[in-house]
């Protein structure tokens, strides 16, 4: 018995995966068939976007489900539920990559064709800025998706088991990465689609062009598969829980970092290559992540889960760290294996990591200021300055380079 809202395909699906309690306490998954007595669908929702999909409530009234329709084991429904969410989060990030590429192509072509002041608008710096940033964010989420897929594949290939438990184990192991991919993918996509509307100008606001539909359809991605707010809380929460359970030496790493902060700072050499400098910056991001998370654990202990703003700041740092490292690793691989196009990989990494450094700096300061004050605050801010020494790069030139490549290719360059 019960009713569930927001069921995708609810109006015409023949099968439903339903979670219910056996004997009032054992959370269990079932396969419920539309033909069972007592299964009905409510009216279609009138949504902002995704008009082509069915979304309805599903109502269960005294529905009898045969034992053969049990999915998994009694009392183990949470395993199915959580890992379906993990997989859905990862796939949503992968879907965002394709949507980013589609919108980038539309923007590049429109900017090449739209004339203003006697020339195509793609020649103007403000438009180049938008196109270049669209390329960089698309590259970042694509890099994270490829990397996370590789981690999942590697774990599955090393597991001799051929049953579904192997997939569940892999998805559970990389649940943090899946949440990161979901949040960043949906938010980078939102940026890209918003700029797609802006580049189209008035035409982006009318149904004659696809930009407005893309914009409406994408908004739900920040709500699907657990809202981005929930996922932001899960990312540091899962990290702390695994560290305290001994999956990795989190507490030891925090103590070692505290000792390191007191020692002389080492920075990248002025003669380092751009990718070496970006790699060094990623190392700094990791230390800032550890420092802010460690301070939060020290300040709040078991009540850390109540500090949602601080957890969100820490989560933003962690996400920029994973994104930046994924971008740099990909650019390094491109430089080592190819010559054609490797400069564009390098430019994209330099641009993304430079801007990530600014975001990490802002989030870390906000987190520290929320947890300390007075002399203690000044001490922690000084430590952040020691950890986060990143020389700025010419982002105008880098975005122009990426924008020109996008216009030349009429879309995504890589």
Image (cartoon, rainbow, N blue to C red):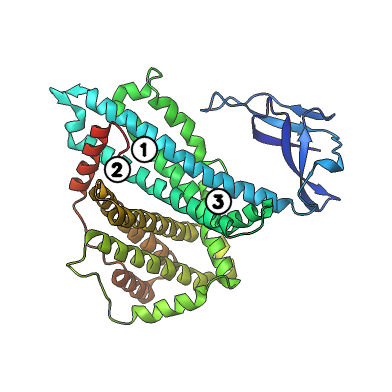
Q: Secondary structure at mark 2?
A: helix
Residue 398, position in %: x, y?
A: 21, 47
Nearer-N-terminus badge (2/1) = 2
Pointer 1 residue? 192
Q: Quadrant of the N terminus?
A: top right
Pointer 2 residue? 133
Q: Report whether residue 232 is seen.
A: no
Residue 41, position in %: x, y?
A: 73, 27
Left or right of 210? Residue 158 is right
Q: Nearer the viewer, mark 1 or mark 3?
A: 1
Pointer 3 residue? 230
Q: Are marks 1 and 3 in contact (CB under 8 Å)?
A: no
Q: Secondary structure at mark 1?
A: helix
Residue at 14% across, 25% down:
119
Residue 172, position in %: x, y?
A: 60, 57
Distance in Å between CA atoms under marks 1 and 3: 23 Å
Distance in Å between CA atoms under marks 2 and 1: 8 Å
Residue at 83% across, 50% down:
24
Question: Image height check: is 266 above or below 136?
Answer: below
Q: Quadrant of the C terminus?
A: top left
- The 10 Å Cα crowd at callout 1, few under 14, some 14 to 19, many 20 or more, is many
Q: Residue furthest top?
A: 208
Residue at 54% across, 46% down:
89
Nearer-N-terminus badge (1/3) = 1
Residue at 29% across, 69% down:
385
Question: Image height check: is 17 above or below 267?
Answer: above
Nearer-N-terminus badge (3/2) = 2
Q: Residue furthest left?
A: 118
């Amino acid at each position: 018995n019960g009713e569930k809202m927001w069921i995708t395909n609810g109006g015409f699906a023949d099968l439903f995966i339903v979670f219910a309690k056996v004997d009032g306490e054992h959370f269990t998954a079932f396969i419920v068939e539309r033909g069972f007595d007592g299964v009905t669908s409510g009216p279609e929702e009138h949504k902002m976007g995704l008009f082509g999909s069915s979304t309805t409530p599903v109502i269960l009234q005294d529905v009898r489900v045969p034992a053969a329709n049990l999915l998994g084991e009694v009392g183990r429904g949470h395993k199915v539920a959580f890992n379906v969410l993990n997989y859905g989060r990862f796939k949503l990030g992968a879907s965002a990559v394709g949507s980013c590429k589609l919108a980038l192509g539309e923007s590049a072509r429109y900017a090449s064709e739209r004339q203003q002041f006697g020339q195509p608008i793609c020649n103007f710096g403000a438009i180049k800025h938008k196109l270049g940033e669209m390329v960089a964010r698309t590259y970042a989420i694509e890099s994270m998706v490829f990397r996370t897929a590789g981690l999942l594949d590697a774990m599955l290939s090393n597991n001799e088991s051929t049953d579904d438990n192997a997939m569940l184990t892999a998805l559970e192991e990389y649940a943090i990465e899946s949440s990161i991919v979901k949040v960043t993918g949906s938010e980078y996509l939102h940026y890209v689609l918003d700029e797609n509307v802006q580049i189209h100008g008035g035409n982006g606001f009318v149904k004659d062009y696809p930009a407005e539909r893309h914009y409406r359809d994408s908004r739900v991605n920040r709500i699907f598969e657990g809202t981005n707010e929930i996922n932001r809380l899960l990312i540091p929460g899962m990290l702390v829980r695994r560290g305290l359970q001994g999956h990795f030496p989190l507490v030891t790493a925090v103590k070692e970092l505290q000792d390191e902060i007191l020692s002389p700072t080492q920075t990248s050499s002025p003669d380092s290559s751009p990718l070496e400098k970006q790699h060094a910056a990623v190392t700094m991001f990791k230390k800032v992540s550890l420092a802010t998370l460690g301070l939060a654990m020290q300040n709040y202990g078991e009540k850390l889960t109540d500090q949602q703003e601080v957890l969100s700041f820490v989560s933003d740092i962690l996400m920029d760290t994973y994104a930046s490292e994924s971008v740099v690793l990909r650019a390094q691989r491109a430089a080592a294996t190819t010559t054609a196009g490797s400069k564009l990989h390098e430019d994209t990494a330099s641009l993304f990591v430079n801007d990530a450094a600014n975001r990490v700096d802002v989030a870390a300061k906000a987190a520290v200021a929320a947890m300390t004050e007075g002399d203690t605050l000044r001490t922690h801010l000084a430590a952040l300055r020691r950890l986060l020494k990143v020389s700025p790069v010419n982002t105008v030139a880098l975005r122009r380079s990426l924008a020109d490549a996008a216009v030349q290719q009429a879309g995504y360059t890589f």
